[in-house]
Amino acid sequence: MTNQIFITGCGTFIPPEVIDNETLVKAYNAHVQEHNQKYSKEIAVGDKTALKISSADFIKNASGIEKRHVMEASGIIDPRRLRPELEDRNPDELSYQAEMGLAAAKSALDQANKSAKDVGMLISACSNYERPYPSLAIEVQKALGIVGFAFDMNVACSSVPFAIRLAYNSLITQPELPGVLIVTPEFYTGHLNFRDRDSHFIFGDAAGALYLERSKTSKSNNIFSVKNIQLLTHFSNNIRNDGGFLRQAVNRNDPWHPRNLFSQQGRAVFKEIIPLVSEMILDQLEEENIERSSVKRVWLHQANSKMNLLLAKKILAREPSPSELPLVLNKYGNTGAAGVVLAFSESQNLDQGSWGVFCAFGAGYSAGSVLLQKC
């Protein structure tokens, strides 16, 4: 029992503002109409391509998403702007992502019956950061009053399983470390191209947090033992965002340039990610001599409902029930690295001894799977 590592706390932060598909489509279609009217002559002679309108049904059928929570809605649904409208906070104020991460972190510590003194390491694990430095993790550390150290990491939507590996190794090898807090504040709508019909609906904003500790220090009644962690990376350009600091030094210094915002080749991602992830998880189960029938829960990155259903079928070798495959992207959208934590937070009601797969995957490609057993 001494070296067992537990997840004993899980917390989330969901922004209060909501945009449903109908509202999002109305703003997008107004932009389409204006664009097509403005460039009608160029479109007529073939110099420009007419934009296609969208619909709420198209979005739901393509992704399973019905609405999303966002940090700022008015700018996103303004056809003249189509992006969040934010105030530039003073450097002495809490940043947007730190505000999100702090709320989720407090919730995770509450569930674990812990406080800031029980955290020796804090990891910020998310896909996008609003600045290169100072570290978001260190900002959250200061706000919580944690004595120890903190750092940022980014493995796109797979960041949380990678952070769990770091937390697990640190707790095993550093006996002085009381516990590890992982925060994943994803302000995803800030890097989304709301002029792109195929992707403007995908993301929402949210934050998740996990607290990990050794079994002997646990005070929680809701405990999951970390049994096996598998990670993999495979380079691909099919999901990409080039919007870094070097954009000001190149000729396409345009905030609306497609390479400065999220872009993906959706069909290729679907085709390539599913075998990559399913094979990793099946190998993991075989390594631990766990029968597929023993897996009672599959918490997946909330990328796409069809993709998640197909992955769960391959993992379980059967059609998953709603309880076996918790899906939350219908109400939150794809929330990046936070998505798997949101699914986990809303579906922890397993019987003692039951197995679950906690898996995330995304740009890179990157993927991470954690076998959890309810204690």
Image: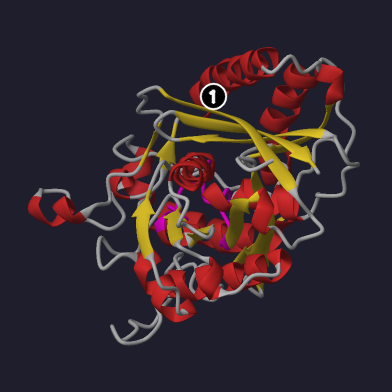
Residue position for label 1: 267
Tell which of 97 and 283 is nearer to you.
Answer: 283
Picture coordinates of residue 298 (x, y %)? 75, 34
Residue 49 image position (x, y, % from top left): 39, 39
Does residue 284 sit above or below 175 in this rendering? above
Q: Which residue lies at the image location 70% right of the left edge and 58% below the top edge?
A: 218
Taking the spot 87% from the left edge, 19% from the top edge, the residue there is 293
Instruction: Name the residue: 72% across, 49% down.
Output: 343
- What amino acid is labelled 1 in the image? Arg
Which residue is found at the position 8% from the left and 53% from the top? Answer: 249
Does the magenta-highlighted stretch encompass residue 199?
yes
The quadrant holding residue 90 is bottom left
Would you place residue 130 above or below residue 263 in this image?
A: below
Q: Secondary structure at mark 1?
A: helix
Instruction: Answer left or right for 351 relative to 241.
Output: right
Q: Is residue 133 magenta?
A: no
Q: Position of residue 72 (x, y in %)?
A: 53, 74
User: The C terminus appears in which quarter of the rendering?
Assistant: top right
Mark 1 crowdedness (10 Å alpha carbons): few <14, some 14-19, many ≥20: few
Magenta part of the chain: 191-206
20 left or right of 336 in image = right
Quick one: quadrant of the N terminus? top right
